[in-house]
Image: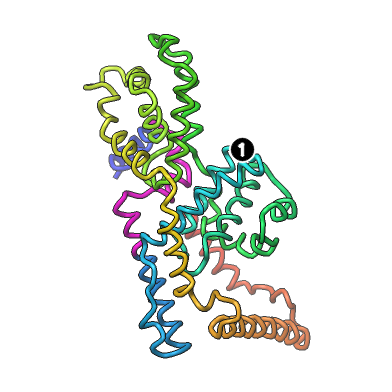
Amino acid sequence: MAADKAADLQTNLNSLTVKRPLYEGSTQYKSWRYSPEQLEQVRTSLNAAAVAVIRDTFEADEPGSSEDVLFLNANEEQLLVKLYITKVPQLCGHFRFPEEVEATAISYLKRFYLKNTVMDWHPKNVMLTALFLATKTTNNPISLESYTSNIPKTSSSDVLDLEFLVSQSLNFEFAVWHAHRALWGIWLDLQSLPDVPEDLRPQDIYDIAIKHVRASRFTDAELIYTPSQIALASLTLASPVLAEKWADLKAVAGAAQPLSATLDPTLELIKYIIMQMGHPPDVEAVREVDRRLKLCKNPEKVPGSKAYIARQAAEHRRAEEKRNKKAEDVRRAGTDGGNPFGSELNEDEKAKQLAELDDDDD
């Protein structure tokens, strides 16, 4: 037994001495990273579940009405979301928001649609809400009135009505680690590294690399790879020689092969994603998806529809029942001479709760 405890203690001490990157302690690393296969599975499952629920809603409203409805698939949903991702830089340019706001809003929009479907929540208002939320979480606030008054056909309620839903879908995990910050760190590092002559690091290389980082935001790269991997891949696209020198100078002494060779397969995949998918979607294809969305949108989310009215009535009824129950509990406590905040625990109850607390501590 003593030997086992000693072994466990040594294991714990060893784990403490291993220096882990700060990124691995972030919510982004723990909650928002996927393999390409996992990402496809999440979206496909979400889409299938949404279609099943919406089909049932159509049928409950009018039997047989769902037979002619052509629902969106997961890829079509992503196409529509991607269009509104490309709108974020335009709005940020209009408001002169910093890049941190732009990148954060795009991350929020991507994460939201890993928990929700466009057939419930159209990306337009979600995008506007995500951007407004990003201004607050990055400490670049703007008043709601100034924000909505500068966006045509947008009211304060369009943003506020979804703000809690967006926050909830993000698990209230607002911190985002971005590739553009990692790229800037690499670029600063290059200024002081030995054996990198000035003519190998002109400013236009950074400018080209940051364009590739911005293009990566139109892809799923940040959901699959780390910010530093995306940053290095973007630098490789701008200057392969400079990126290789930086990677090799960062290699651990005595490594079997240069770090650039180890990273090369991953960087090639990221470069492919950026070059092949880092551009706005075809507008005509998106228009067709948006047209079909109007026909397959969840009726419960369409104001004025029978399903919407029935759902609102049910929610009001549940809220009223909850209020009435609470009022009745307070009235009964007052009538019976009891304490509306609850009666005191007797000795047996106190002992039981203390025992449960002790068990939790163990």
Q: Main secondary structure of the magenta part?
A: helix
Residue displayed at 54% across by 50% down: 87
- Residue 34 sits inside the magenta stretch: yes
Mark 1: which secondary structure?
loop
Which corner quadrant of the image does residue 257 belong to? top left
| Residue 38 seen in this snapshot | yes
Residue placed at 63% from the left, 40% from the top? 97
Give the vertical position of 357 relative to 59 (above or below). above
Q: Position of residue 194 (x, y in %)?
A: 41, 10
Which colour scheme appears in the figure? rainbow
Quadrant where the image shows the N terminus = top left
Q: Identify the residue under disc 1.
A: 98
Q: Position of residue 48 (x, y in %)?
A: 35, 70
Dot 1: within a 10 Å radius of its alpha carbon, few (fewer than 14), some, or many (20 or more) residues? few
Q: What residue span does the magenta drawing correspond to?
A: 17-44
Q: Quadrant of residue 151?
A: bottom right
| Picture coordinates of residue 274, whole percent (x, y) | 37, 39
